[in-house]
Image (spheres, rainbow, N blue to C red):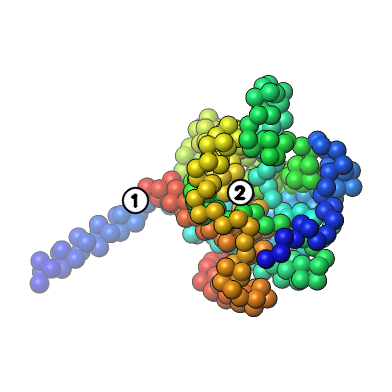
Amino acid sequence: MTDASAQLPNPAKPTDSSVDAASQLMAGLLFGLVFGFLLQKGGVGKYNVLIGQLLLQDFTVAKVMLTAIVVGMTGVLTLHHFGKVNLHLKPTRIGANAIGGLVFGAGFALLGYCPGTAAAALGQGSWDAIFGMSGLVAGSWIYAELSGWSRRTVETWGDFGKVMLPDLLHLPRSVFAIGLAGAIIILILVLERFTIR
Amino acid sequence: MMRFARLSGLVVLTVSVAIAAEPGVNALDYDGPAWSPYVVGAEIGVLSWMTFYFSGKPIGASSFYAHIAGFIGKIIVPRHMEALPYFVKKPPRVSWEYVFMVATIAGGAIAALSGGEFTNEWLPSMWSERFGEGIAVRALIGFAGGLLMAYGARLAGGCTSGHGISGTMQLNPGAWITVICLFIGGVAVAFPLYTL
């Protein structure tokens, strides 16, 4: 595994400590507009679509995410292979990933929007997203208050650092990625065959 | 024989009453997506290429809320906030991620207004069919949901976007663990909420 951050100049490098460079912020603005637009058009700003996924009635969320993963992976890993982009891996910490994921899921079911889709839902005029977004701010604060504790405990359980699945399995990245893409495409075909929406 | 017929009749009756007794809230009775999920998914994938290439950033949502918490905290209790380990490592900033999410709200508005899908409602109809018209209940449960999500996302290192899409596509094992656990946790809570 190569630490990608050393290979290319990082365009995200801030020139000021509290504000990113203007060009970087403009790009973020443009990409965010597209992201919110796509989330709403994809129906994932809708409460019933999101809860429908957790009730295993509506598989729109899975279809959007799986397609995004296949397409995104193909481009990003190819760009990275040719040295055009850095990867931005977050550390794998099995305990924190699993417990955090479960807690997140419980909250997701209560609110019916996730952090990104809540923003799209608010833009869509689903004002109840505001309650969840306030909770998200409060929860972030609570995490920060407890961050010293979790760093000494939960976040040390099964800490593998920044790794990739093919490296753990000793497979070439391309082979692993092609295999995974194939598996996801089969899963999408199965979903398309057996789900109503 | 007669007895068996009567017994099986009773079983059929009990089962059908049990099914009928389930609240008939079905997510498919409400509006679905305007566009094909595959078209939208593919475009989010392509958007990822662009955020990696032009901004050196993966798509992510949850850190936006941590920035806001940091901004508020810096006003109310600045010295306390700056000493918290999380904010020492990631000080709240007007960053790419922050602007990205503000723009996500606007993008959702443009899509909804242009597609005639602007809802202007405080309660989703699927929610009110199940839990009634009380906004306070929705506010309380929604706030609690957001709170749990943010704690979980910070602990796991990302949310449905940062791990679920950006992390998985980079073949990060932690992202796959997070997204699988996220759906397990979500299903485990959504089912009792809507079927008990």
Give the residue drawn at x 71%, y 26%. Answer: B74
Describe residue A83's horizontal placement relative to residue B83 as left or right: right
Q: Is residue B137 left or right of residue B106?
A: left
Left-right relation of B34 to B24? right
B6 or A168: nearer the viewer: A168
Of residues A108 and B91, which is closer to you in this image? B91
Give the residue number, with chain letter if any, for mark 2.
B157
The residue at 37%/51% (across/down) is B22
Q: Residue at x 34, y 51 (%)?
A: B21
**Hey, what amino acid is under mark 1?**
Ala
Q: Of the residues tagged 1 and 2, which is closer to the observer?
A: 2
Q: Position of residue B116 (x, y in %)?
A: 73, 50
Query: Residue B189: x, y in percent?
Result: 44, 48
Which mark identifies residue B21? 1
Front residue of B177/B129: it is: B177
Q: Chain of mark 2?
A: B
Q: Is residue B14 visible?
A: yes
State how many labels appear: 2
The residue under the point 54% across, 74% down is A190
Quadrant housing the N terminus of chain B: bottom left
Q: Position of residue A121 (x, y in %)?
A: 66, 45
Looking at the picture, does residue A51 appear above or below residue B42?
A: above
The subunit carrying tag 1 is B
Vertical arrangement, residue B157 with respect to residue B79, above or below: below
Q: Looking at this view, name the residue that lies furthest to the top.
A: B76
